[in-house]
Image (tube, rainbow, N blue to C red):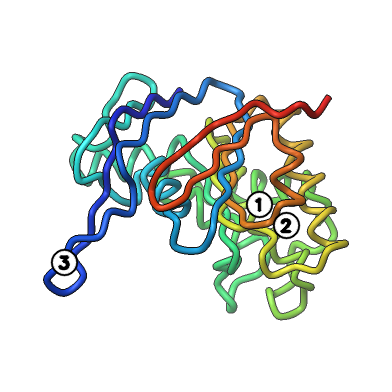
Amino acid sequence: MYQLNGVTKSYRRGKTSVDALRGIDLSIADGDQVVIQGPTGGGKSTLLQMLGGLDRPTSGVIDFDGTDLAKLSEARLTRVRSENIGFIFQSFNLIPTLTAQENVETALVPLGVKPAERRTRAAAALESVGLGERLTHLPSELSGGQQQRVAIARALVKEPKVLLADEPTGNLDESTRDDIMALLEGLWRDRGLTFILVTHDSTIAKRAPRLATIRKGTLTVRESTRK
């Protein structure tokens, strides 16, 4: 699935250069679940953006199923993201004037899916996250946990190979956090997804089969002892 070799990302800050990632090497197989944990500013979200093709490294290789994402044209990179990668963010990123079903449908528009099929697939995706009776509700009519479920449905409706989640429970209380994590882990198992999640929450990190810790742009990986 993923093979990262020597991935470095540097930014200019005034007259100085800041390394967000420093020579990252990482292998992620099909169907893996990996949690990336670290302090704010440590590079974890930057790494996730590289895996999702949302940003390019300064140097190094990001091999995704045999293709180096760093070398793709913008058009091809956009296509890879649209077809293969689902994103979930802390802020939900729902369009406030669209219903839950319409928000989910937006993920299928770039793929050229016809309207009738979009509606059917969006409804099924919402049903799979427990919102089958909330299709016509606007985001403002939903709780935070329900809004994140809509965002999860939107990420899954295109049937991606990879699910990337950046602090998906950061805006939720502990009870809702646990519900969302149980949902995500169930979807990972049932659908055979490759699931990569960024968090600062140690409670979530302890649940992971593989934990990657990133500090000052340097990554260490360990296998969990959780059974």
Front of the two marks 1 and 3: 3
Residue 32 in sight here = yes
Q: Around disc 3, counting alpha carbons within 10 Å, would you say few (fewer than 14), some (14 to 19), or many (20 or more)?
A: few
Please say if the residues under marks 2 and 1 sit with CB atoms less than 8 Å apart: yes
How far apart are the two marked residues, 1 and 3, measured between alpha carbons? Answer: 39 Å
The quadrant where residue 164 appears: top right
Mark 2 element type: helix
Q: Nearer the viewer, residue 184 or 214?
A: 214
Q: Around disc 1, counting alpha carbons within 10 Å, would you say few (fewer than 14), some (14 to 19), or many (20 or more)?
A: many
How far apart are the two marked residues, 2 and 1, measured between alpha carbons? Answer: 5 Å
Q: Nearer the viewer, residue 17 or 102?
A: 17
Please say if the residues under marks 1 and 3 sit with CB atoms less than 8 Å apart: no
Q: Which of marks 3 and 2 precedes in the sequence?
A: 3
Q: Is residue 137 left or right of residue 7?
A: right
Q: Which of marks 3 and 1 precedes in the sequence?
A: 3
Q: Is residue 213 left or right of residue 73?
A: right
Residue 87 position within the rendered picture, expressed as x and y whole percent measured from the top left: 52, 50
Q: Which residue carries the number 2 mark?
A: 149
Please say if the residues under marks 2 and 3 sit with CB atoms less than 8 Å apart: no
Q: Which residue carries the number 3 mark?
A: 16
Q: Which residue carries the number 1 mark?
A: 152
Residue 215 position within the rendered picture, expressed as x and y whole percent measured from the top left: 46, 50
Which residue is at 77% across, 48% downward?
A: 181
Q: Amino acid at mark 3?
A: Thr
Q: Around disc 2, counting alpha carbons within 10 Å, would you say few (fewer than 14), some (14 to 19), or many (20 or more)?
A: many
Q: Amino acid at mark 2?
A: Arg
